Amino acid sequence: MKVLMVNGSSNLKGCTFTALTEVGMALEKQGIDYEIFQLGPKPIRDCIGCGKCHEGKCIFNDDDVNRFVEMAQEADGFIFGSPVYYAHPSGRLLSFLDRAFYCSTTSPKNPFNFKPAAAVVSARRGGTTASFDVINKYFTIAMMPIVASSYWNMVHGNSPEEVKQDAEGLQTMRNIGVNMAWMLKNIEAGKNSGVSLPEVERTHRTNFIR
Ligand SMILES: Cc1cc2nc3c(=O)[nH]c(=O)nc-3n(C[C@H](O)[C@H](O)[C@H](O)COP(=O)(O)O)c2cc1C
């Protein structure tokens, strides 16, 4: 089983990466693989709401969104990590996730539904829980069970060295890994004993109430 993580910072080896790596090491101890998908510093387009997503693909092919959505099909769980910018997740992560999640609704097999997920945020000081809330909202609209930890999923630091001194933050990261592994094994065990995925209603899209 494999967890696909996203580093929503353009700093390839920064604080968010350090936090995600701590989760990853805990996952590996439980026998679960992981990969960190780097958004990097290159431009990422915003969703333009054109509605032309087709079969789980965005019309824009000049960044990594479609590649990520393809990889997501094979993943069993997700962690989305972000630095805190002015008390919200990075703009690049939000642009990326808006398009990845919106185009996935047109996919014959949505790559996110029913797969467990967790958000991770990194800040020097403030804006962590607001940022954490924003990322969690992608999960709850996509029927993704949320993996919890022993505190809200944050680390504090302005550099990886500072993050490594945040003992409780790192403990929180390790506990995400342990709990994610536990949830994945439970889902697998359920599948093996005949528990199928839920059949949910998808017929109503009520834009306003008369
Ligand atoms: C544009 C910008 C805005 C920031 N806003 C905040 C903020 O609101 N609160 C905070 O605590 N840190 C803020 N920071 C600091 C980063 O969140 C913090 O250093 C983070 O750990 C960096 O993660 P990274 O190394 O993965 O990029 C900001 C940094 C930048 C570049």
Image: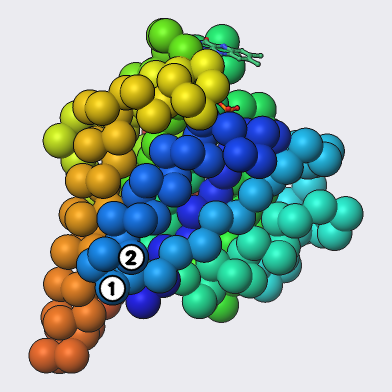
* Image height of 175 relative to 41, above or below: below
Q: Residue at x 44, y 20 (%)?
A: 162
Question: Circle 2 sits on which residue?
Answer: 28
Q: Residue at x 14, y 80 (%)?
A: 190
Ligand 1 sits in which quadrant?
top right
Direction left: furthest residue: 193
Q: Residue at x 42, y 9 (%)?
A: 125
Dot 2 falls on a residue whose secondary structure is helix
Question: Circle 1 sits on which residue?
Answer: 31
Q: Are marks 1 and 2 in contact (CB under 8 Å)?
A: yes
Q: CA distance from mark 1 to mark 2?
A: 5 Å
Dot 2, how many residues are within 10 Å of its Cα: few (below 14), some (14-19), or many (20+)? some
Percent across and percent down for residue 194 are 15, 90
Res. 154 in view: yes
Q: Quadrant of the N terminus?
A: bottom left
Percent across and percent down for residue 82 are 52, 33
* Kind of residue at disc 1: Gly
Dot 1, how many residues are within 10 Å of its Cα: few (below 14), some (14-19), or many (20+)? few
Res. 95 in view: no
* Image height of 128 relative to 102, above or below: above
* Image height of 70 relative to 175, above or below: below
In the image, 141 versus 89, the foreground residue is: 89
User: What coloring was used for the rendering?
Assistant: rainbow
**Quadrant in the picture for residue 55:** bottom right
